[in-house]
């Protein structure tokens, strides 16, 4: 039976997430004894927080060697900043700590078992990605309740629907600016789903293209006789 070696792991957190980060670290170490958990703290040290009691090693984001870190951090909100420093943490762990492989997990994860398959996979490949979605999304076109998604599925649906709606409205406005007043007819199988969420579309004819092709065919038939 193949044996796997525990892989060190890192996550990224701010002070307000350290409670969940601790739970993650403790659960990972429970099933991976001998591993080390590294946490990149994207925040300033707070005297009220007992950092020494946590079961992980802390790396301060401003010590990662990111050029002009204050300017870098100013570009993002705190969630985006936690994501933006990720490649710099990987480089730090490789160059400064000497790791040749490492896992990354979000800090709000609870580990229930040894991640043996991931360990084997990482020993055979340069990188291993695990999907958030393990089954296809349904193909029903409906707008999500919120533009700002609360999870992976919501965010994907919101980006697809409202992103495409914005594309439709943007192109339509440009056309109307050139033509002046015009009647806007939406066509295509999903036209109705978008038309009900914008004031720029006046009518919906899902089969407009097919009607046009039929007319062209009829004209050609008449012309051939």
Image (tube, rainbow, N blue to C red):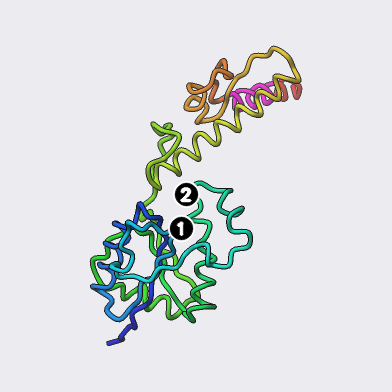
Image: magenta residue range? 208-218
16 vs 104, nearest the viewer: 16
Judge the density around disc 1: few (<14), some (14-19), many (≥20) Cα neighbours within 10 Å: many
Looking at the picture, how far across and down is residue 217, in whole percent? Answer: 67, 26
**Quadrant of residue 56 in the image?**
bottom left
Judge the density around disc 2: few (<14), some (14-19), many (≥20) Cα neighbours within 10 Å: some
In the image, residue 142 sits, relative to residue 180, either above or below, namely below
Cα distance in 3D space between marks 2 and 1: 8 Å
Residue at 62 percent of width and 18 percent of height: 184
SS at mark 1? loop
Numbered tag placed on residue 76 in the rendering: none
Q: Which residue is mark 2?
A: 78
Residue at 47 percent of width and 27 percent of height: 193
SS at mark 2? helix
Residue 43 part of the magenta segment? no
Q: Which residue is mark 1?
A: 42
């Amino acid at each position: 039976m193949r044996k796997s070696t525990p892989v060190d792991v890192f996550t990224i957190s701010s002070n307000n997430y350290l409670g969940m980060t601790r739970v993650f670290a403790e659960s990972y170490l429970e099933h991976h004894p001998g591993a080390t958990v590294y946490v990149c703290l994207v925040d300033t040290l707070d005297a009220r927080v007992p950092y020494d009691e946590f079961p992980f090693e802390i790396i301060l984001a401003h010590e990662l060697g990111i050029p002009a870190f204050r300017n870098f951090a100013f570009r993002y909100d705190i969630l985006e900043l936690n994501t933006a420093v990720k490649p710099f943490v990987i480089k730090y762990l490789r160059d400064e700590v000497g790791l040749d492989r490492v896992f990354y997990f979000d800090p709000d994860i609870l580990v229930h078992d040894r991640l043996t398959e991931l360990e084997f996979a990482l020993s055979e490949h340069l990188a291993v990605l695990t999907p958030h979605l393990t089954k296809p999304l349904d193909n029903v076109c409906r707008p999500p309740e919120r533009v700002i998604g609360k999870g992976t599925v919501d965010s994907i649906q919101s980006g697809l629907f409202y992103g495409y709606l914005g594309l439709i409205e943007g192109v339509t406005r440009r056309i109307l600016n050139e033509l002046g007043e015009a009647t806007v007819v939406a066509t295509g199988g999903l036209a109705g789903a978008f038309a009900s969420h914008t004031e720029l579309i006046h009518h919906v004819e899902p089969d407009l293209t097919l009607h046009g092709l039929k007319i062209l065919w009829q004209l050609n038939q008449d012309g051939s006789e």
